[in-house]
Amino acid sequence: MTQTAPQSLADWQALAAALTLESRAYINDTFTDAADGATLTTINPATGETLAEVASCDAADADTAVAAARRAFDGGEWSQLAPAGRKAVLLRLAELMETHKHELALLDTLDMGKPVSSSLGDMAGAIGCLRHHAESIDKLYGEVAPTGNSALGLVLREPLGVVASIVPWNFPLMMTAWKIAPALAAGNSVILKPSEKSPLSALRLASLAREAGLPRGVFQVLPGFGHTVGKALALSMDVDCLAFTGSTAVGKQLMQYAGQSNLKKVFLECGGKSPNLVFADCKDLDRVAQHAAGAIFHNQGEVCIAGSRLLVENSIREAFVDKVLAAAERMQPGDPLDPASFMGAIVDDTQHARILDYIRKGVEEGARLRTGGQALDGPGLFIPPTVFDGVTDDMVIGREEIFGPVLSVFGFDSEEEAVRLANDSDYGLAAGLWSQDIDRIMRVTRWLRSGQVFVNNWAEMDQTVPFGGVKQSGNGRDKSHHSLEEYSDLKSVWMTLTP
Ligand code: NAD
């Protein structure tokens, strides 16, 4: 559809009314129903309206797609193409995404409820990711090992083969781009399984990929449930790599599936319960409070790196929490199609009920509910910013990933106590640290067990910096050159030279 730049709620509503949704799977260069005709219903959580009946793929579809992906890989049209050739196609895809970014953003907003301004930010991230990997792939050199003159040792970097990318619903197209851009740039064939809660943008992406010139079988999209098509891909004997973003529980299952099948490589980006440490020496506490609120309420709190544990030095805690409450007041949910909305709707009934259940537990456990706590009246699934103070590390709301707009505030009296609380978690995805004291910043940064540490900011990032977790938050890195390592292997070539 034609893309003009929508500015207002009415513009976005008009664009939504004109949308044509692709609901079929994309297998072997063909848009198709699931082999058994099954479908799943995708709902707009802001209104409760049905958006589409989408193909719900299963094992038979996975088998067809894996066979096509393998044929494509072995055929070499993509895997053996010179990197500059792959670059050209991926840059074309990025250009097409740019042209259609409003439509793609809208699909994510309708499908999972996030504000459209936030979805547009995701598109910039997704397109930037495509461009980064496209641009970098023809600038990477292999190695010549220092073997001595009687031999030549070459170290080549080669694609893995068939990569299955299984992604979540919270940033549907951006998480997709983080996975598929380096995997395709490296020369793999990629099968994308979007979340059953947000398949629409991935299916639109498939048509753009075809238009960009990705050869048959190199990129396929299989919508469906995790326990059906996701599991089938994970157990396949002919998938070489599972690249997963999602919950820690499912990540653990995928490792088992790999062990039960062909020992495929399993690259995981999983959950988090990220601590955000605020020391009393900060100069501008209003600014820090604004960021602390944004760290949890952005994207309705449905963010892997949400700053869901706010650790505040007790000497400023009372005053600081008041500032966070004031900031939260300005972040109330609104119509996701309104560009002015900061928060949108919760993705579906299940997640909505789960968040409310955690809020109930927080109250039962004796944490102090300072704001929020009640769902807004339906039909849309909206939960306002919710803040608990006086949380301790034995409370469920202080330990488990809620994945909703619920902030747990802890107090601490010393740097040691702050670090102990921060590290007392199964997760290690992100941590924030606010202080003016450079010695403290360096000390605490080194002690935090976390894939990334944000110092005097929350979640500033770009494509050049790797993203990923330690502990049960994952085992690899998206973004930057480092992500190519997830999708390629080293081949050592030893050539004996005739003296
Ligand atoms: P989820 O684990 O329920 O689902 C993720 C994907 O896995 C979906 O596509 C789902 O269909 C699929 N899946 C589920 N069960 C499966 C199975 N048995 N076999 C194969 N596939 C299966 O997670 P979610 O609810 O979609 O997303 C929320 C989670 O994602 C949170 O824990 C969040 O922290 C995490 N997340 C992590 C990052 C990161 O970069 N670390 C980014 C975004 C989200």
Image: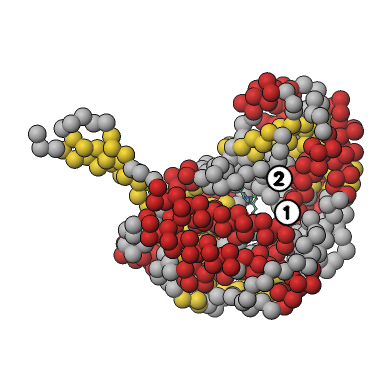
Label located before the other in sequence (1 or 2): 1
From this viewpoint, is residue 102 visible?
yes
Q: Is residue 60 left or right of residue 431?
A: left
Q: In the rendered structure, find residue 469 and report the number of the disc placed on it.
A: none
Q: Is residue 224 left or right of residue 443?
A: left
Relative to the observer, which residue lies in front, 491 or 66?
Answer: 491
- Residue kind at label 2, given as amino acid type: Ala
Q: In the rendered structure, find residue 306 and report the number of the disc placed on it.
A: 2
Relative to the observer, which residue lies in front, 345 or 320?
Answer: 320
Q: Badge 1: few (under 14), some or many (20 or more) residues near its Cα, within 10 Å? A: many
Percent from the top left, x then y, of residue 109? 70, 64
In the displayed structure, 167 sits above or below 6; it is above
From this viewpoint, is residue 347 visible?
no
- Residue kind at label 1, given as amino acid type: Asn
Residue at point 42% right, 51% down? 137
Q: Which residue is mark 1?
A: 299
In the displayed structure, 319 sits above or below 344; it is above
Q: Secondary structure at mark 1?
A: helix
Residue at point 83% right, 61% down? 334
Question: Exactly how many numbered labels are in the figure?
Answer: 2
Q: Is mark 2 within 8 Å of ligand 1?
A: no
